[in-house]
């Protein structure tokens, strides 16, 4: 993307001095999988379609955010690819002058068919959730089939996505014997690998906590088989990276529980119903949908966003109050 940079770009600064420049945009709370740590089996309490922000409304909010210095947006969900015409939305967002980077988090079940048009629409980077390479284990964790995900990954490579990051939730008693297999898979395909600690959210929080694995243990285990070089690829996100010596493989560790990274948090989240969540692990929020549908002006919208950032809490409290967050990860946009 070739965008002109504007001098004296406005910025959103929260009460703790953090610059907010990244937004996670959940385009649906629905999903075609049911990962046991994310969405309860049989869950049906989805947002009514008339509450979904329309593409026009989404574009309007993202435009306002970009005019306040938010330069990066990630499409997420639920599963973003189950929302119809998502490539069209991507196209509209990448056309916004202030948006420098549009990325996607997906389970890749529908990526095979959509990879090319998403890349064409200007999405450059994707994260694919994949916790196991065993079809049986995949079924156990997600309730779905593994093959479409693998097909989706190949399609993404062919479409030209780079980097492709695999997000693997590390779980005690579930996939702890598969970390090396995933390392080898990522080496083979030139993917980046990121391990994630389970977080206690909503009704699935207990499932997540039962299998919690401290990623320091995972790193230690990997270092017995591979020579890990620390400190590569600082990036703007929460992952701390190492690289396997003499390879291009980068491995990130996302440790919201064992080493939280709230002091450098640069993000907020917009859910499909237009709620702006200021923190993944707290309930601080502002409802934007009523404002948009009451005919708020562009300037008033920007003022509402600036005021909302004033509500961003200092940190999550997953450790002290693990059951505090009542909403599911799939509602907020993980
Ligand atoms: C909520 S999903 C949404 C995007 C897409 N459906 C996907 O799976 O990539 C985003 C990320 O959140 C992670 N996630 C969901 N529930 C979690 C939990 N309780 N703890 C840690 N990570 C979780 C998933 O593994 C996934 O990588
Ligand atoms: S982690 Fe992603 S794929 Fe799995 S249930 Fe949640 S939203 Fe769906």
Image (spheres, rainbow, N blue to C red):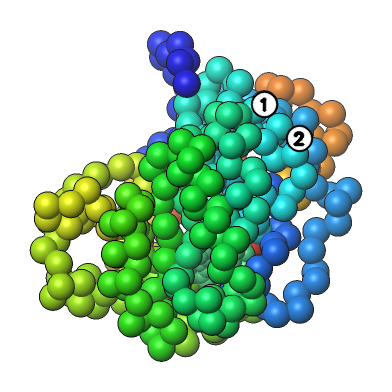
Which quarter of the rendered image does ligand 2 occupy? bottom right
From this viewpoint, which residue is outermost toward the right?
50
Q: Of residues 216 and 150, which is closer to you in this image? A: 150
Question: Is 165 displayed left or right of 154 in the figure?
Answer: left
Of 30 and 203, the residue lying toward us: 30
Q: Position of residue 43 (x, y in %)?
A: 75, 75
Q: Which residue is drawn at 20% across and 77% down?
A: 221
The CB of the residue at mark 1 lies under 8 Å from ligand 1: no
The label number, if any, that marks residue 134 in the structure image: none
Label at residue 55: 2
The residue at the point 59 percent across, 78 percent down is: 139
Helix, strand or loop at disc 1?
helix
For residue 219, which quarter of the picture?
bottom left
| Residue 291 appearing in the image | no
Mark 1 neighbour class, 10 Å CA radius: few under 14, some 14 to 19, many 20 or more: some
Residue labelled with disc 1: 92
């Amino acid at each position: 993307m070739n965008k002109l940079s504007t001098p004296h770009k406005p910025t959103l600064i929260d009460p703790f001095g953090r610059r907010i420049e990244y937004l996670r945009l959940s385009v649906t709370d629905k999903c075609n999988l049911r990962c046991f740590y994310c969405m309860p089996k049989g869950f049906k309490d989805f947002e009514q379609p008339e509450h979904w922000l329309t593409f026009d409304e989404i574009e309007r909010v993202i435009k306002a955010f970009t005019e306040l210095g938010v330069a990066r947006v990630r499409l997420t969900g639920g599963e973003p690819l189950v929302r119809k015409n998502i490539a069209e939305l991507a196209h509209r967002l990448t056309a916004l002058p202030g948006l420098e980077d549009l990325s996607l988090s997906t389970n890749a079940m529908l990526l095979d068919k959509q990879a090319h048009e998403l890349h064409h629409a200007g999405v450059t980077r994707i994260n694919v959730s994949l916790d196991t390479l065993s079809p049986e284990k995949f079924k156990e964790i997600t309730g779905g089939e593994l093959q479409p995900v693998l097909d989706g990954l190949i399609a993404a490579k062919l479409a030209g996505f780079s980097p492709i990051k695999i997000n693997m939730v590390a779980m005690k008693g579930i996939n702890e014997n598969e970390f090396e297999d995933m390392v080898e898979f990522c080496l083979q395909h030139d993917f980046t690998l990121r391990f994630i600690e389970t977080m206690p959210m909503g009704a699935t929080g207990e499932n997540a906590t039962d299998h919690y694995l401290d990623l320091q243990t995972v790193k230690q285990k990997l270092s017995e088989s591979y020579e890990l070089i620390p400190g590569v690829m600082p990036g703007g996100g929460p992952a701390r990276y190492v690289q396997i010596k003499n390879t291009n493989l980068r491995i990130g560790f996302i440790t919201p529980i064992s080493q939280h990274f709230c002091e450098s948090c640069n993000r907020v989240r917009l859910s499909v119903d237009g709620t702006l969540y200021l923190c993944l692990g707290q309930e601080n929020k502002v409802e934007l949908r009523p404002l948009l549908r009451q005919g708020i002006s562009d300037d008033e919208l920007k003022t509402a966003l600036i005021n909302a950032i004033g509500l961003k809490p200092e940190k999550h409290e997953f450790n002290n109050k693990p059951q505090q967050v009542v909403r599911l990860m799939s509602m907020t946009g993980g």
